[in-house]
Image (spheres, rainbow, N blue to C red):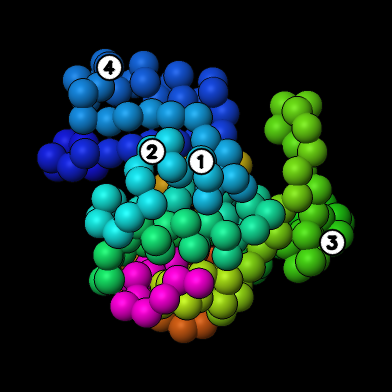
Amino acid sequence: MAGTGLEVTAVDRSVAMVEQARSKLARAGHSESVRCLPMDLDKAETALDNVVPNAVGHITGALSNFGVFNCLSDRPALARALASRLPAGAPLAVVVMGRWCPWEICSHAIRGDLRRGFRRLASSVTAEIAGGPAFRVDYPNPRRLASDLMPGFRLRRTVALGVLVPPSYLSHWVDRWPRVFRLAARLEVRLAGTAPVNRWGDHFLALFERTSGSSS
């Protein structure tokens, strides 16, 4: 995004991740156009005040990637905080871990672990990274995600990610049958935005638009 001329503020809860991003930006020559800050998005209504004032128009769009919205304890609170700063019509792109991942279900079913294969259907699960503190993860479908972000945002489109192409932890399959998965990747581009395929996959991309109404 910085390479297109945008001014970017990037946030992550992990200080170590923020430092990694700063190092990469420095090597790419984009340090001046990107601010990287540690931020707990579960406290966004106050934390965002340190980044942008609570006034419409100070940011023109927002992106959340890699399942951040799956790990929030209060998605509506973050939606209100963003809506108070985005003008009507502004884009919000959210990449979310979906409920139905055929690759995950099949790979665990082959091992006889159906409980893990269907874990995303539970109301929530507990996870931890590298022995850190446990946190809650849930897997909303597009309709529920849209409900959580209303009335400040309207869902415009949903696109599946990782339906015919496996997630990274199964990349050895791609290495084994590269021609098959090159074809699968081309086919996925055609199908990923159509129902019901757009609700499947390891992740899905939900494209929202800031409404002209109240965000409360």
Q: Specify the amino acid type for callout 4.
A: Ala
Whichever of callouts 3 and 1 sits on the residue coming sooner in the sequence is 1
Query: Residue most toward the left?
Result: 5
Q: Are marks 1 and 2 in contact (CB under 8 Å)?
A: yes
Q: Quadrant of residue 5?
A: top left
Q: Are marks 4 and 1 in contact (CB under 8 Å)?
A: no
What's the CA distance linking mark 2 and mark 4? 21 Å
Residue ID for mark 1: 47
Residue 165, relative to residue 16: is it above or below? Answer: below
Q: Which mark is residue 51?
A: 2
Seen from the viewer's position, the closer of residues 197 and 16 is 16
Asked if residue 50 lies left or right of residue 86, the reply is right
> The residue tagged with tag 1: helix, strand or loop?
helix
Q: Are marks 3 and 1 in contact (CB under 8 Å)?
A: no
What's the CA distance linking mark 3 and mark 2? 44 Å
Residue ID for mark 4: 26
Q: Are marks 2 and 4 in contact (CB under 8 Å)?
A: no
